[in-house]
Image (cartoon, coloured by chain):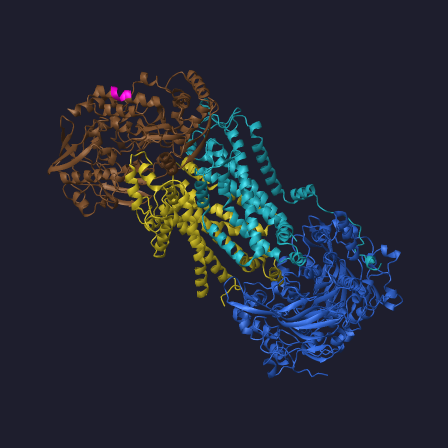
Chain colours: A yellow, B brown, C blue, D cyan
Amino acid sequence: MLTYVAKRLLMTIPTLLGAAVLIFFMLRVVPGDVIEVKLRGDGASVTQDVIDAERRRLGLDKPLPEQFTSWIAGLTRLDPGLSMWTGKPVVDEMSVRLPLSIQVAVMGALIATLIAVPMGTLSALYRDSPIDYLLRIFSLVGLAVPAFWFGMVMILLLLWLFNWLPPVIYTPFHVDPIANLSQLIWPALVVGIRYAAVVARMVRSSVIEVMKEDYIRTARAKGLAEKVIIIRHAMKNAMLPAITVIGLEFAFLMGGLVVTEQVFNLNGIGQLFVQAVAHRDFVLVQNIVMFIAAVFVFTNLAVDLLYAAIDPRIRYR
Amino acid sequence: MTKSIWASAGALALAFLTTQGAMAQDAKPVRGGILNYGVAGGPHTLDCHAGNSFAVTHHLGPHYSTLMKTDNRNYPNTIGDLAKSWTISPDHLTYTFKLHDNVKFHDGTALTSEDVRASFQRIIDPPAGVVSAWRSMYADLKSVEAPDKDTVVFKMSAPNSGMLSIFGSPWACIYSAAKLKEDPKYPEKTVMGTGPFQLVEHVSGSHWTGKRFDGYFRPGLPYLDGFKAIALSSTALINALAGGQIDAEFRGVTPADQQRIQASRGANIRFEQAEGMGLFMVSFNTKVKPYDDIRVRRALTLAVDRWGGIEPMSRISTLKYVSSFQRPGAPDALPKAQLEKLPGFGRDIKAARAEARRLLAEAGVPNLKFTLINRGPDMPYAPFALYLIDQWRQIGVTVDQQVVDTANWAQRRTSGNFSVIVDVTGDWGEDPSFVMARFLSSDTSFNNPTGFSDPKIEQLFQAQKLEFDPAKRTQAVNVLENYIVEQIFTMPVFRTVRLLPFATKVQNYPVVPVHNWLGDVSEIWLKP
Amino acid sequence: MIAPNTLRMEKSASPGLVPVGPPSPGRALLTVNDLHVHFVQAGGVTRAVEGVSFSVRQGQILALVGESGCGKSATALALMRLLARPAGRVVKGEVLFDGVDLLKLSEAEMRERRGRDISMIFQEPMTSLNPVLSIGEQLMEPLIAHLGMNKQAARARSIDLLTMVGLTDPERRLEQYPHHLSGGMRQRVMIAMGLACNPKLIIADEPTTALDVTIQAQILELMRDLSRRLNIALIIITHNLGIVARYADSVNVMYAARLVERGDADAIFARSSHPYTVGLIDSIPRLDRPRQGRLSTIEGMPPDLMALPAGCRFAPRCPHRVDKCDHDPSLVAVEPGHLSACWRAGELVTGALQARATATDALLSIGPATAPVRVTVQELKRHFKVSAGRGWFSGAATVKAVDGVSFDIRQGETLGLVGESGCGKSTIGRAILNLDAVTAGSIIIDGQNIADKRAREVRRRTQVIFQDPFSSLNPRMSVSEIIGEPLAVYKFEPDAQRIEARVQELLGQVGLMPYMAERYPHELSGGQRQRVGIARALALKPSIIVCDEPVSALDVSIQGQIINLLDELQQRLGLTYLFIAHDLAVVRHISHRVAVMYLGRIMELADRDELYRNPRHPYTQLLLDAAPVPDPVIERGRRPRVAKGELPSPINQPKGCVFSTRCPMATVECSQAVPALRQIADGHYVACIKVEPC
Amino acid sequence: MKLGAITTSVSVPSRARPTGWRKMMQFATTQPLGAAGLVTALVMAIAGALAPLIAPYNPVAISFSDMLAPPSWEHPLGTDNFGRDILSRILYGARTAIVMGLVSALIGSTLGAIIGVVSAYFGGVVDLLIQRVVDIFLSLPIIVLALVVVAMLGRNLVLGFDFNLILAISIPIVPQVARVVRSSALSIREMAYVDAARVAGYSTRRIIFRHMAPNLMAPYLIMLTAFIAQAILLEASLSFLGLGVTEPSPAWGLMLAGNAVDFYRQAPWMIIFPGLAISLAVFSFNLLGDSLRDWLDPKARLR
């Protein structure tokens, strides 16, 4: 098992390195410059020599390959560098915002799973019945409603109906669970419902597939109760493809929080990303992207391991 | 003597301020409370000298003092902050300031003239690695000396009629000379000044909190126990105001926002406003055909119905005034009658449009098409451009808009990668030398992106700069402004309003046009 | 096989089991009366079972025989009330089990009986066990659900059961998962599960169809044994007449949703009284009789169950059809206990009607020994690395799919390649077709190495007919496009018109109607598809055809048609065949020479008649013994010899002789060296050190 | 002649080759939800195409006298803060959404499908390399890719639509389609008919395009429809973030961008209708895609 994990970890290196090369060089082609935004963006009168000095200070005068290798070298030492915008360590900038984003993503995943698994199963078991149609339409609506609009409408409704808005400052859960939840439950709902729609569809089709399997017929022939057949025989098998989707969506979600955080004004990694792009803070952008890519890669790894844990056919020998 | 010059100008300006704030003076200030206000953006630096945006001053302002400051009750007069008194030599080449003697830094050390000297020295001659964003503004300053503990002397290389107001720049924070000696970059990491509040906590992207500095030199101040500046996107900011989560915001909201917030908050919110410093303009790249032809530029400015458009625009955006380069209420502004004679500012839009069509035909581009570069997506760029495009459509000009983000916009603007671009100024001060500097010829002013050069502009500019008689100076400024507007390399269109929301309990904050300066937070108090 | 002492232990362990001797005529345990099953779908109603009645007594083995789609499985599922919902429904009839009509029970009452009184064993052991639950979990389930056992008791009983079905090391098996077991072992687990609650009846739906012939024999022997000893009634559903002949007491033949003939096995085989039964028995190649020239066949196809013709359903295909057949015949006794649904049953049973169309036109029976060699395979090896499981979960292992095989094929000859699954026979076929690269060795066709880039022409002349008629035709192309494509690509014909004409000609050659050119594969039956596949191969003007199990996916009656077609084409066009199959009788029928393969090697190679008359390799002998023949009299006379053990995994091949682990003659020497293929008589090669040359 | 005498089918030939129309009818009857999706999508597409004919107003003309007018007979869906007719803007917006969605999904899916088939057919090193690149692209967040591509390429108007934006939207689709198509193609490559084509000595190109590609139409069509929905959503999100279509071009996401939300109290119709339009478009394409999958995928169909 350990060698397997080690091998898989090794396998992630080319992917991550490829992503690093891609994002690094793509970013450098983007027009705009952090120093100009910083010193000229708001109409101040800064002379060229100030700008040049700042450019030298940030190491932007060095050739690109050199900048790239020093970034990668830094990454291997777990030192991703300093934000070009605030000058603070990237680690600090990101670690302030990560707990929030991770919490929203995890809560979204939880909400999604809690909604999707029973929903998809019900839909599959009552296939082509009115219940199925209703649940399918619900999940399709969940997929269709744009997150930004959903979030917007949710905020406006809260404001309109209760004249109340979620807190604007993040409180860690362990400090004040109520304040924490009353801020984050809404974005989690918005991402969770969409996420649930994706997962429910997968659960539905995989339950339908599984219920057609021979071993379900075997279980029926054994005289087991339908409930036992569904829970014990069908669900465990049906969850395998569902886990892949839950994992994959989780990884996508981390990259997709941009819009939600924008709408809910959450000080998370997605908001930071948008700001960093707007500021052309490439050091921060590339590190956030690498972080999200790493989340993607490691979530996939985790899914595979979980798969192995559930499916006895996949075992390290 | 110089004081009196400004006093009269200030009185004039005050007339343009809507003065609901006046009622604040009726009640007796109460100490205590925390002020929560929103800021649409985080500071990119903790060093005032390197800062240039409201996001910097709106966070750092309460922690620092400056030598002089703008008088928010007698705008745009300049008064002392750390300076108790000052004298100016008759040749306008030496400025001598006496400092208050009870000023303490947040670390308990006393402020001396050396701190002021070291801070200004850092601005005009930054050590390696230190960014001084405003260095060029102090180009006429030759040296700074601290002859004794309470006295600072500035020597000028040339006279400058706007120098006193430059001493009031909100960016010229006074740092501790001792700490600067240890590390000239300390202000980038530590917020430590002589201001009314001490920094408690800064959570990047989230909030910034300050508490009362008990050693603040102005007796009885500040009233507040502390403040919390909350970082919010511009949309969230309005929501937070409507939800009562913040008590104030100091950059300004739109009239639509005002209605929305008012509807939610009712009697718990009030609004105060002043003419804003944001001037929305269009710049032409005069190096690119056909914009090298003044007839084309003239046609394009004539086509825009400023007077007809401003009322509806004011309902949906922060744009509220028809304005040339100087604020209509500014001491040296062009008189309205003179303004209306300038191209594009006329009242007869039909005639103007006919003239515009004729000019375009004459210039050989009757069906002009171009791409307007706009900066997005903030307020009020989008409605501004939409209005322009619609106006130009009416003289047969087809305009396609390309919205780019600030970084791209700034780059295009400085590198001349545009033919027509939405342009903006948002100065922190009112002095004509300061306001008009960016409209100097492109070879003199790196902030003029149009590539337009005309030595006459420099001549007229120098003339007003060396003029110390207020009336004569106004005249000189008017001549300059008239001339620049007529060259139409940059066409001014609309000016913003600074419309500030306050929870009803927030007292004693006179609204001035400048949003890049936070104002005096120490005097704000909360009605229990 | 189960050792007697194992059984005795089992008896004492479970007092609930009452051992009874041979089948005794007792009361009916299960009686099915006039059962009708429909499948209702969007396209219409499929009448899957119509008016089927039969009964089975305790300890009796009853066979339900018929070709695919005849309704035999639907009948079984209807008894268990496990028809696929919501499409499948019983519209009429009763199923009396111990006097209770199962169809009238509530779902809960029925559930109690399933697995306790009646068990069912399914065809696909690979998919019938839940892959994510351990054997123990699955085996203990019915014990806990029906008998209320606690975990310990259920575990003890499970170990007993696994021992009873002949699985070694039962404690460890309980912890294992289905994928750890081979197909045969899984089927044993299924049987153990079926036996768990001492059922009175076991229904086995094609229980050995997916298994190799040696394993098939093991499983069936086990089931018969258990049925006799535990007095369990057994319903075996199968299409394999050999199995029926060997194991069944009573036989029910179904055709197109109806029962057409019923009787005891001897009567059915000896005095078939329905033309369908007659045709069925005649259309299989026989190991127990001299090879006929041409197989008798039942022409045509079974009717569409959605649109049934009036009258006797077999009439359109029946050689004895008379006018009366327009009316439905009913199932009536032709002799005591022997019923038939045919108007002319009386004539058939007395032999008054010449039932067997004697096939007289004999084909070339001897291989043309003097003909030139067309294909030479020398020391062919194909090894490949596999990673068992997903991704990186296991280290790579080498599978020696083919390990040093040599043979040649002469012009106009058919070489039969026979062996159980995984023996490498298809791999050889693919190598000859240049579909896979070989690891070592060479394949020379007409003097050219086929791996040579310049050998294109030779490769084109070597064509293929695949096993699966469903995946071998591109579903997006019409029949004329499929057959016409090579004509156009190789410019065999100058224009579209000539191509069209040639397609028609080819369709005629393979016995398809001209109008079928416009059809798409999904509109054709399996046999028709196989004919299209043959036409496609012929279009390329081949001289050598690799037939990779061309009939094994087809029903018996269709199988005969295709075999005859291949035979005729060979004669007419002078084709050379490599005929790959697992069915010994089919191979015997069509081949001139036969090579028997086991785990990547040839065990024995000889002329067809020599090999079947005088098999020398112990493996060949075992194979021939294991294959049942459709004659109960002969079957009763055969010694019950069953190969021991399981097929070893190709990843862990035994040392020395690969067959040594299962060989009844094996000694220590056998596992020391790989025996060479030696000639022991003229043209008879054997790879066994125990075989003395004659 | 003996061979010709072999007869097979005795039953009368009843040709049942489904025609396009019959297929449509079969789809409509077996997949009523899908048919509803198809009709809705078609109606939107037609409305978009005919926008210049049926839209009551010029979608870009500012009319301050009609500012923030509530829904009425003159303005069925009201007007926005510039007095522009919302119905007209939504109709023109349909044009943008559907063209953008269709073209970028088409480009992305086709490119992805080709990459997937090639990867599967050749296998080995080619497959390994392509899969690594696909992994890399998959690991980068969609918004990042789209944003960087838009910023990198600038704008490139073709027939009034920003082609570079279309490219930016299509790029994230490519790896996702490539992955799915590759796995389908892998199973098709194992099909006996592909072996038969190889044995017949056909060229690689013929095998890929004549024998494999047509059999991948089902997954391709399913993915295409699903990605049209995704692309519409992505375009709306990008426009909302200010990275997509720019004013004054009418686009649904754009109608919600900026300070539109500030007018929710005075003019809720400004927020409600564009959001509904996006949701309806995405919903109908998803419905269609879902039903197509049920219909085309024999595995998912009833036995």
Instruction: Tell me: residue A107, above or below residue B382.
Output: below
Instruction: Using the image as rendered, state which of residue A252 and residue C94 is in the foreground.
Output: A252
Q: How many marks?
A: 0
Where C20 falls versus B433 (above or below)? below
Q: Which residues are magenta?
A: B475-479
Q: Is residue A18 visible?
A: yes
In the foreground, B29 or D246: D246
**Hey, which quadrant is residue C202 in on the image?**
bottom right
Query: For residue B180, which quarter of the picture?
Result: top left
Q: Is residue C230 left or right of residue D9?
A: left
Where residue C522 appears, as percent x and y from the top left, is 70, 52
Q: Note whether C295 is above or below B99 in the view shown.
A: below
Q: What residue appears at the point 19 percent right and 29 percent down from the top-left corner?
A: B158
* Residue closer to the observer: C530 or A132: C530
Q: D218 and A17: which one is in front?
A: A17
Residue B477 lies in the magenta-colored region: yes
Q: Confirm whether the magenta stretch covers residue A59.
A: no
Please give left or right for residue B206 compared with residue B120 in the image: right
Does any portion of residue B239 appear in the rendered image? Answer: no
Q: Where residue C637 sits in the image (x, y, percent)?
A: 76, 78
- Percent position of residue C56, x then y: 73, 67
Q: Seen in the image, is C47 located left or right of residue B2? A: right
Give the x, y percent position of residue B453. 33, 27
In the image, farthest residue toward the right: C352
Q: Magenta region, mostly helix, strand or loop? A: helix
In screen coordinates, is B498 left or right of C612?
left
Question: Outermost residue toward the left?
Answer: B148
Image vertical order of residue B473 relative to residue B34, above or below: above
